[in-house]
Image: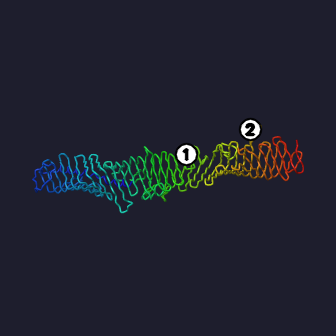
């Protein structure tokens, strides 16, 4: 926006109006001898073809003072009066003395005026020069007493700026100067990066209000920076000429390319490296006292504000309103997007965040985006995940998104068929890591009609739920680790542990620390589910093998019976029904109803047959009648019969 600020000095002088008006005023109040004879007989150029001169003066000078201070002085080398009432001045030189030592010097080859009608015209080499470095040149300028409207090209120069307009229109009462029929200006500088240009259909300077308005196809460029709009207006304070307001309206487009000096200041993220394009319907400048632009606020009224930023990564930002906050060093401090704000990133790892409000902050040292704060209706998306929360923060340097609650519902994240809910969810997109902390709830969706769709192998078509204090999901290894009071269940199948590992989205599972499992093994005689309760130090499960393995101080309980071992494996059939249980190492079985117990090195329980087979060297059976040893002990749990085979004796009671 610097071109707008610097351009303020171009059109503010309204001295052209003063030039013509003062000629009329000076000659109207001067005591002219209208009967004086024509001096030297020189050929004159009357305004009207049949007009004849009636008065010629070699020199003319008039000054005008106010309150003891000179405010103007007009001189002419030759003055001619005509019978029609028109006067002609040649070699006109006008000086206007402003406050604070500002002066305007205006010259022209000739001026014509009529004191009665107040009409006047400056002709030939009309030039205005101010003590502030302003120059205006035009071929002719006419004045009808209240306004001027000449479609004659006007050239101007203000400091390093030079330009041209197709015409000029002056409105005295409003103190307004209009440049019309196309306005162009160029700023020259030894450094190419400092060169700039501006084009518009027209421009207006209003002295009373301190406004400068460019309208119609407005375009400002500075090397690889550009801004365009239907209208751009700036307002300055009269007391210090600092800018107080800056607005733009209609088809706002701002571009910053990678070689842009402004882009280089802002770094290579949201602003920089590659082209940045911002489109909006309207913008206003945030300008506090002092006239320094501290921000630009873009509005999307028909369509959202849209910023496209090429680079690594490429980002797009859309919102109803976007505010660019600028530091005193002219770098970007923050971007504030409100109203259905969305920021997406391309590249090898595309992602997007959405919220009602997104604030992006820049590191003051690196000038790059460092972090973002998201509020209300937050949504995170990447190719594998989608998360929602009340609030979130985005650490762009550390590549970390943290979703939290703001007193409402806990954040949720869906990733590859898994739903995760927790008090806080952390996402590390590049590392492919997800973390949940506090009141964790996870749901693994079952695959319908799959023979191995369940972590726990007997709840076909139903999801698996997991509660814990924390969870970490690593995408590269397809592993999830739940910790702290873990409970995992599917239908009636449940596992409790201090830590639970799930691999390949449920293809494998392991648990450790106070493991307790409740597994369904069919129905009892009354048609109620028959449950097996198991305890161990660790648990492991594999879908492909259709096995669940318990290790370390294993204890299996079912109604009326307890089995203990060092290791126990549950085997499931293709329909995910518990088929048999294999135990080994310090195997023991105790029946509460009969008081019988058995010991061995290996045991097999077949669920459908309801038979238990214990092997050992020897296998030992103990009951109220004594102890019997053999190589094999067989229990028929349905008939409550037991048989001892081999060894010292055969035990086969009725």
Residue at 25% across / 47% down in the picture? 147
Quarter of the image holding residue 332?
Answer: bottom left
Looking at the rendered structure, the secondary structure element under dot 2 is loop
Left or right relative to 425: residue 73:
left
Lateral position of residue 379 relative to residue 447, left or right: left
Q: Nearer the viewer, residue 548 or 405?
A: 548
How many numbered marks are there?
2
Q: Is residue 569 visible?
A: yes
The quarter of the picture where the C terminus appears is: top right
Residue nearest the observer in this picture, 647 or 209: 647
Neighbour tally class for label 1: few under 14, some 14-19, many 20 plus, Cα within 10 Å: many
Instruction: Please tell me whether mark 1 sits on a helix, a strand or a loop.
Output: strand
Q: Is residue 590 left or right of residue 128?
A: right
Of residue 224 and residue 378, the one placed in the foreground of this image is 224
Residue 132 lies left or right of residue 612; in this view the side is left
Q: CA distance from mark 2 to mark 1?
A: 44 Å
Residue 186 in the image, given as x and y percentages of width and height? 33, 57
Q: Which mark is residue 625?
A: none
Give the mark toward the camera: 2 or 1.
2
Q: How is the image coloured?
A: rainbow
Image spot of residue 193 (x, y percent): 39, 60
Among the two numbered marks 2 and 1 on one chain, the one whose residue lies closer to the N terminus: 1
Residue furthest out toward the bottom: 190
Disc number placed over residue 528 in the picture, else none: 2
Whether residue 441 is visible here, answered yes or no, is no
Q: Are marks 2 and 1 in contact (CB under 8 Å)?
A: no
Observer-nearest residue: 327 or 386?
A: 386
Q: Which residue is mark 1?
A: 390
Q: Quadrant of residue 226?
A: bottom left
Q: Residues within 10 Å of mark 2 (few under 14, many from 20)?
A: few
Percent x, y of residue 329: 43, 58
């Amino acid at each position: 926006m610097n071109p707008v600020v610097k351009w303020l000095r171009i059109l503010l002088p309204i001295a052209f109006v003063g030039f013509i008006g003062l000629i009329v005023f000076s000659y109207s109040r001067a005591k002219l001898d209208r009967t004086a004879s024509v001096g030297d007989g020189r050929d004159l150029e009357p305004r009207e073809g049949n007009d004849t001169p009636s008065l010629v003066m070699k020199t003319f000078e008039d000054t005008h003072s106010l309150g003891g201070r000179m405010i103007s002085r007009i001189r002419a080398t030759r003055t001619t009066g005509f019978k029609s009432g028109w006067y002609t001045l040649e070699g006109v030189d006008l000086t206007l003395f402003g406050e604070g030592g500002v002066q305007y010097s205006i010259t022209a080859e000739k001026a014509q005026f009529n004191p009665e009608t107040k009409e006047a015209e400056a002709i030939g080499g009309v030039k205005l020069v101010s003590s502030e470095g302003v120059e205006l040149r035009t071929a002719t300028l006419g004045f009808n007493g209240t306004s001027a409207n000449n479609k004659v090209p006007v050239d101007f120069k203000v400091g390093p700026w030079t330009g041209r307009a197709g015409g000029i229109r002056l409105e005295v009462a409003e103190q307004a100067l209009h440049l019309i029929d196309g306005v162009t200006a160029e700023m020259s500088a030894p450094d190419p990066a400092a060169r700039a240009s501006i084009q518009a259909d027209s421009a207006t300077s209003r002295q009373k209000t301190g406004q400068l308005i460019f309208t119609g196809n407005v375009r400002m460029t500075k090397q690889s920076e550009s801004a365009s709009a239907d209208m751009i207006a700036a307002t300055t304070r009269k007391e210090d000429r600092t800018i107080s307001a800056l607005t733009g309206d209609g088809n706002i487009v701002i571009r910053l390319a990678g070689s842009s000096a402004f882009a280089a200041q802002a770094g290579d993220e949201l602003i920089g490296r590659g082209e940045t394009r911002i489109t909006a319907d309207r913008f206003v400048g945030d300008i506090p006292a002092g006239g320094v632009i501290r921000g630009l606020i873009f509005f999307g009224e028909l369509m959202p504000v849209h910023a496209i930023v090429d680079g690594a990564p490429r980002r797009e930002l859309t919102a109803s309103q976007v505010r660019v906050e600028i530091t005193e060093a002219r770098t970007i401090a923050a971007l504030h997007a409100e109203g259905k704000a969305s920021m997406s990133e391309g590249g090898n790892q595309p992602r997007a965040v959405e919220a009602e409000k997104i604030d992006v902050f820049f590191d003051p040292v690196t000038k790059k985006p460092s972090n973002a704060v998201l509020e209300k209706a937050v949504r995170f998306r990447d190719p594998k995940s989608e998360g929602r929360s009340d609030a979130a923060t985005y650490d762009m340097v550390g590549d970390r998104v943290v979703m939290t609650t703001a007193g409402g519902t806990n954040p949720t994240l869906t990733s590859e068929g898994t739903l995760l809910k927790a008090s806080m969810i952390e996402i590390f997109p590049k590392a492919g890591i997800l973390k949940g902390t506090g009141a964790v709830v996870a749901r693994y969706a079952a695959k319908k009609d799959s023979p191995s769709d369940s972590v726990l192998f007997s709840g076909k078509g139903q999801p698996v739920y997991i509660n814990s204090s924390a969870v970490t999901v690593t995408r590269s290894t397809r592993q999830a680790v739940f910790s702290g009071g873990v409970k995992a269940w599917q239908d009636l199948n449940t596992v409790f542990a201090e830590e639970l590992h799930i691999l390949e989205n449920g293809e494998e599972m392991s648990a450790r620390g106070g493991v307790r499992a409740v597994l369904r093994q069919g129905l009892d005689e009354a048609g109620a589910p028959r449950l097996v309760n198991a305890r161990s130090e660790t648990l492991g499960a594999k879908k492909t093998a259709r096995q669940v393995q318990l290790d370390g101080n294993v204890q299996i309980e079912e109604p009326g019976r307890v089995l203990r071992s060092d290791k126990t494996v549950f085997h499931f059939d293709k329909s995910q029904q518990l088929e048999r249980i294999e135990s080994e190492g310090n195997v023991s079985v105790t029946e509460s109803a009969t008081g019988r117990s058995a010991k061995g090195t290996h045991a097999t329980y077949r669920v459908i047959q309801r038979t238990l087979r214990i092997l050992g060297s020897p296998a030992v059976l103990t009951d109220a009648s004594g102890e019997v040893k053999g190589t094999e002990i067989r229990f028929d749990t349905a008939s409550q019969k037991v048989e001892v085979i081999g060894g010292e004796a055969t035990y086969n009671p009725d």
